[in-house]
Amino acid sequence: MSGIAEAPLVRTPVLIIGSSMVGMTLSALLAKHGVEKCITVEKHSSTAIHPRAALFHPRTMQICRELGLYERMKAASYEYYDEYAGVHNVESLASKRLGTWMKDINEGLEDISPTSRMFLTQQMFEPLLREQAEKNGADLRFSTELVDFRQDEKCVSAILRDTATGAMQNVPAQGISYSVTIYFKADLGRFVRGSMNGVIYVNNEHVRGFFRLDKTGTEGFLVVNKAGARGTDESRFPARDITRERAAELLTAAIGADVDFEITLFSPWRAVCDVADRFIENRILLAGDAVTPNGGFGGNTGLQDAHNIVWKLALVLQCHAGPKLIQSYEEERWPVAKKTIDQVFKRYLLRTDPELRQPDMLVEEEVPDSHLELGFQYVSRALTNKTLPNDGHITSDPAIAKAVAGSMSHHVLVQETSAVAGVDYRPHPIADLLGHSFVLVCGHGGSSWVQAARRLNMQKKALPDVAIHQLSSDPCNQRFYNRYALSPSGCVLVRPDGFVAWSQHSLDLQDADRILVTVLAQRLKCIVEQTLCLEDRARL
């Protein structure tokens, strides 16, 4: 590892390589969970400078809501894009419509999520995320690249280089085809009225790809996945030897009418539909494009990777959990990534590249977007469930599925009891209670669970504190009991990432204290491994 001895030494509990959407989300969330002095490096000098396609899913927006970004993102999105836009398939903008994949991207979402889908480019999102990460105390270092690294049983040592000055730092840390994007300006407003200003797939003999336009139709980009006669080299590799003249021909064919336009940029890129064999190598963790490159529902998968790992890292570094908790990151996220990749390939075949589909090709049935975004299920050592409840399927319908161990805490409105006279506890999304710690939500007949959790918090053991909420007897809470398969004397324990860790249908008067201690200890592996955790801290 050349230069490691000469480079100045800087210590950090977590070193994050890459500071785009996923890296900055990791930074912001780690700082939010109280992990200080983490360093995030990015070889580029700033946040994204190109728009890049971005449809943010409701689960991703729940994470952004937790970071305090949701309302700001909505305001930025609605300035340029229509919240009721759809996903359509046309021969060209000026020609006939071939079909509609999604009439309204937010239709029906209000019943299953406190957040909506929205269009927002990476160029617009990353500055908001950077501001929030730095506000939380994150150390973001742009114009800094990873030169080399090594790891042993104590730490990972990395050599970083300032690309502006050339200065080096030694940082030990604990812890399918080629496409082209054409950016342009034009007056296309007459073609994109109503829901037609969402994602517009184009399929004709000259070009196959999709448009993403602002709501005025005056600015946007065209992604060209295939071009020319089907089955030819040009069809498979439209970005090869691309010129401004050829880009203009492709854009004209996609518009389908004689319209003046200005091409501001064209950028070849490679679309990969793949997933890493593993997400963890000792003390090195992979997230985002490092494990699910382009095709994993964009940055949505990466942000959810980050959300899954940060609270586990925080609890291990703070000695509230044993190191084996980290292993549950791969156990939980790898199956979701694989399912997502398979579904993305299915959509790619249907919407963009049907010529790739062969009669003998095995392609799984398409799963509805909401099932893939909000209905996936985890199985891991950090949960009480050992098998998938939905007949072995990793996804289910979030509108009707029960919230059980390993599933997301499904969206319902809840009303809490008021312990303070005059306080108005109106019904609110259960998501308002989540995101900072483990949360115990008890029914109105579950006072013994409340008392047991309070005693547990007072014992000051290795276990982390549990936030406690008890529901009122108002009938509005019946939907909560139905969705979470609880009686009014039951309770549910939700993890910091909003997934159900454990639930108990009804009250056990004799063993409430023991059950809560056992459940938390088993989920975190923190009692038997506390000594090891302290040794890990000493290595810092």
Image: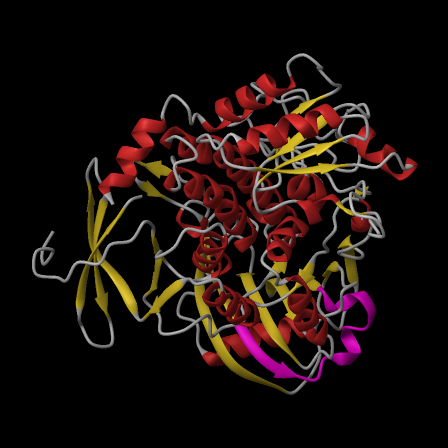
Name the image quarter holding the C terminus: top left
Quadrant assignment, res 215: bottom right
The image position of residue 452, as x and y in percent, is: 64, 25
Q: Could you tell me which residue is drawn at 82 percent across and 29 percent down?
A: 482
Furthest toward the right, the residue is: 475
The image position of residue 247, as x and y in percent, is: 52, 75
Q: Could you tell me which residue is drawn at 75 percent across and 73 percent down?
A: 94
Furthest toward the top, the residue is: 510
Quadrant assignment, res 73: bottom right
507 vs 92: above or below: above
- Indicate whether residue 184 is drawn in magenta: yes
The image position of residue 361, as x and y in percent, is: 56, 33
Q: Could you tell me which residue is drawn at 68 percent across and 45 percent down?
A: 433
- Indicate whether residue 364 is drawn in magenta: no
150 vs 258: above or below: above
For residue 202, say whether it is visible.
Answer: no
The image position of residue 75, as x and y in percent, is: 70, 71
**Magenta segment boundaries in residue numbering:** 182-198
Figure label count: 0
- Toward the viewer: 42 or 290? 42
